[in-house]
Amino acid sequence: MPTPAPRCPASSRADLIALLKLTRWLGRYGPNRHRDGLDGAWIDITGVAHLFGGEEALLKDLVGRLRGFGVSARVGLADTFGAANALARFATTRRASAIAPAERTDDVIATLPVEALRLAPDAVLLLKRVGLRRIGQLTGLPRAALEQRFRSQVSAKSRAREMADLSGAVILRLDQALGRASEPLRALAERPVLSVRRTWSEPLISSDALGNEVNVLASELSTALKRAHLGARRVGLTLYRADGTTAHIAAGFSAVTQDSGHIQRLLAEKMQAIDAGFGIDVAELDARQTERSTAEQSALGRGFAETHARAEAALIDRLSNRLGAHRITRVALRASHIPERASVRVPSQAPRSPEPDPHIGKARPILLLSPPEPIEVMA
């Protein structure tokens, strides 16, 4: 008799880690995304669908890639998170994806059960008791009538408040699904200030081709920074491989920059260690930290000083990105009445504090003895 294969015990922690990895990969379809519970994820594809040939083409690409990874998925697309969640989990279409056309959300989700509104079990049970089983029955019902039906199920005054809370939850979820009430969503990572991306139908494998495309991204980001009157303090490059893995590169600057050439040089040094694998088909360059940059006309005689300052900043950036930001430091003032604690070493790329040291201009010792020597006084 053959020995049965050992069963692999379920692990909620391992499932959560796998879901988070998948959610990070979903960044190829939009920078804002996060997991939804323990069995789903959401993506904001605003301004991204045209890069894939439209919404239907994007969903087809998404479902096809997930199927290639061995992941079965149901996908819903709508103007609101509540409607998209309802379509993904409760739509009866045979296709793996369901789309609610713009401004027709209420018609598309009308046939879905009330469970699709993400309601508590008590609220669902109460709705079914009063004969409301479909979302469409709620949309055409006046709010006062809905609350009256909830009250009709209440006999004890002690439960009146509980029923009122349930009716309020039903109205809120319905309004969120239809776009009448906002539903803020927290993304997996902080949204970049500015972001540019490029996609290719054929994955890039050659390092030269990839480097040329990253240079184009740097130029586009530089143009966007100038248009917004911003300078980058930190940028990040995300490369999405065809096999579902990603690679990340980050670069920091000691002074705000809009120079595409400087951004390209810092990224090029780290791209040498990137393995393209089966090819890279999406690249995204983000300005993750920016500061206001105002264009000032330099006075005569200051040109050499400004050129020297830019060259110094470029050198600091190259050394910091090559050796590590914590290895290249500078001395910064720190507010302390103890002289030996009035300065501290910080990374050279750290922003300079605009606040002056309160002890500057006051009487301070010009020399500290090491070790300190006691001073004898008469009284």
Image (cartoon, rainbow, N blue to C red):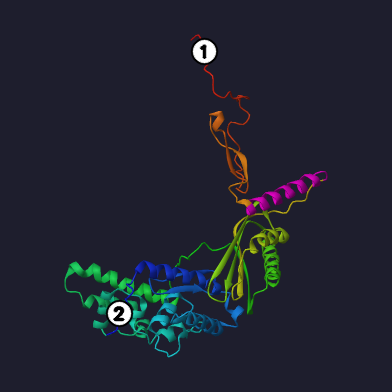
The spot of residue 130 in percent (x, y) is 25, 82
Q: Amino acid at mark 1?
A: Glu
Residue extending farthest to the bottom is 94
According to the picture, the residue beneath numbered tag 1 turns out to be: 376
Examine the image and state in which quarter residue 177 appears.
bottom left
Q: Are marks 2 and 1 in contact (CB under 8 Å)?
A: no
Q: Quadrant of residue 218?
A: bottom right
Which is more toward the observer, 332 or 194?
332
Q: Nearer the viewer, mark 2 or mark 1?
A: 1
Q: Is residue 334 magenta?
A: no
Q: What residue is at 28 percent from the left and 78 percent from the top?
A: 124
Is residue 167 visible to the viewer in this orientation of the structure?
yes
The residue wearing badge 2 is 145
Q: CA distance from mark 2 to mark 1?
A: 90 Å
The answer to whether one can see residue 255 in this image is no
For marks 2 and 1, the one nearer the N-term is 2
Specify whether 86 is left or right of 158.
right
- Magenta part of the chain: 300-322
> Image check: 353 left or right of 85?
right
Q: Residues within 10 Å of mark 2 (few under 14, many from 20)?
A: few
Q: Position of residue 54 (x, y in %)?
A: 58, 83
Based on the picture, tell me whether residue 302 belongs to the magenta stretch.
yes
Identify which residue, 364 or 208, lies in the foreground. 208
Q: Amino acid at mark 2?
A: Ala
Q: Nearer the viewer, residue 183 or 141?
A: 183
Q: Secondary structure at mark 2?
A: helix
Question: Which residue appears at 39% of the width and 81% of the height?
Answer: 89
Q: Main secondary structure of the magenta part?
A: helix
Question: SS at mark 1?
Answer: loop
Task: Determine whether, in the image, residue 167 is placed left or right of residue 178.
Answer: left
Position of residue 94 measured from the top left corner of the image (x, y, whole percent): 43, 91
Q: Which of 290 and 339 lies nearest the eye of the viewer?
A: 339
